[in-house]
Image: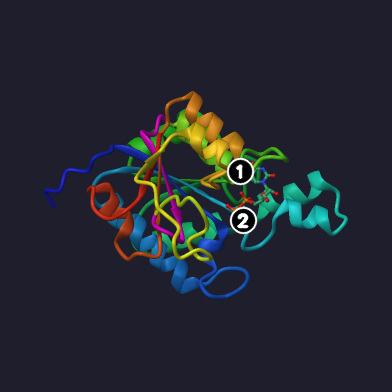
Amino acid sequence: DTEKPAFDRVLLKISGEALMGDQGYGLHPPTVERIAREVKSVHDLGVEICMVIGGGNIFRGLAGAAQGMERTTADYMGMLATVMNALAVQSALEELGVFTRVISAIRMDEVAEPYIRRRAVRHLEKKRVCIFAAGTGNPYFTTDTAATLRANEMACQVIFKGTKVDGVYDKDPAKHPDAKRYDEVTYDECLQKHLGVMDASAIALARDNDLPIIVFSLDEPGGFRGILAGEGTYTRVH
Ligand code: UDP
């Protein structure tokens, strides 16, 4: 393979919902496998890959709080949900022969490694995919913020945010056929216009550290590798 990738080290953020397929809840193994293949195809180019996976397919803190649960407890449940998703993706990647580590922001030594920055960097250098689980380890945050935090710590050149649509639109393209996609957009515009790329704290953290975010569609087969090669449609937030 002579294709020269545009990036050496990237972070891929996917929501938990990306793993549930057409089901309304939980994990859909063929979908998890499909995403693992997308990751492998980029890993095969020699790109060092970090991943952060959400937990919304299993549990969201805000939803628990809305049902009367104590917010921080609900958030810890959400973080635990991300660990389950991380293990599922790890299993699918290793099935394809890609070596991985699940690295948890909440200690659970029998299940995952604790987060030690230098150790994680070493894993990347050895071409292991690092799947960062349990978000930031703190309630009141999201996995978008965890993704931005880890991408900065790991010196990733860019965050790839895989979604259901091929970029950032001025309004929800599922509801508005005349919605327009941005080729590029600034962090401040995302914040001011509430463009829903990531939550505000994640965007601010990316902005303050000049970390670009590329929003692309994970539903497009080969999309992840294509975007890395500069093909396909996406939005660059910078
Ligand atoms: N969460 C948290 N702190 C973090 C990351 C996540 O408390 O640093 C909790 C929060 O309750 C959140 C849930 O974990 O709702 C699942 O994460 P998220 O909503 O980001 O998942 P996604 O929407 O990406 O599937």
Q: Position of residue 85 (x, y in %)?
A: 56, 58
Q: Which mark is residue 238?
A: none
Q: Position of residue 61 (x, y in %)?
A: 73, 51
Q: Position of residue 131 (x, y in %)?
A: 48, 47
Q: CA distance from mark 2 to mark 1?
A: 9 Å
The amino acid marked with disc number 2 is: Gly
On screen, residue 189 above or below 32 = above
- Viewer-nearest residue: 213 or 117: 213
Residue 114, can we see it?
Answer: no
Is residue 236 inside the magenta stretch? no
Q: Which residue is mark 1?
A: 135
The kind of secondary structure element at disc 2 is loop
Q: Specify few, some or many for label 2: CA neighbours under 10 Å numbering under 14, 14-19, or 20 or more.
A: many
Residue 44, can we see it?
Answer: yes
- Viewer-nearest residue: 183 or 151: 183
Ligand 1 closer than 8 Å to the CB at disc 2? yes
- Viewer-nearest residue: 139 or 120: 139
Which residue is pictured at 59% across the width and 42% down the height? 199
Q: Specify few, some or many for label 1: CA neighbours under 10 Å numbering under 14, 14-19, or 20 or more.
A: many
Q: Give left or right: position of 53 versus 141.
A: left
Q: Position of residue 56 (x, y in %)?
A: 63, 58
Q: Name the image quarter holding residue 213.
A: top left
Q: Which mark is residue 55?
A: 2
Is residue 157 inside the magenta stretch? yes
Magenta region: 155-166
Q: How is the image coloured?
A: rainbow
The amino acid marked with disc number 1 is: Gly
Ligand 1 closer than 8 Å to the CB at disc 1? yes
N-terminal of the pair, mark 2 or mark 1, is 2
Q: Give left or right: position of 29 versus 39.
A: right
* Farthest residue, direction right: 68
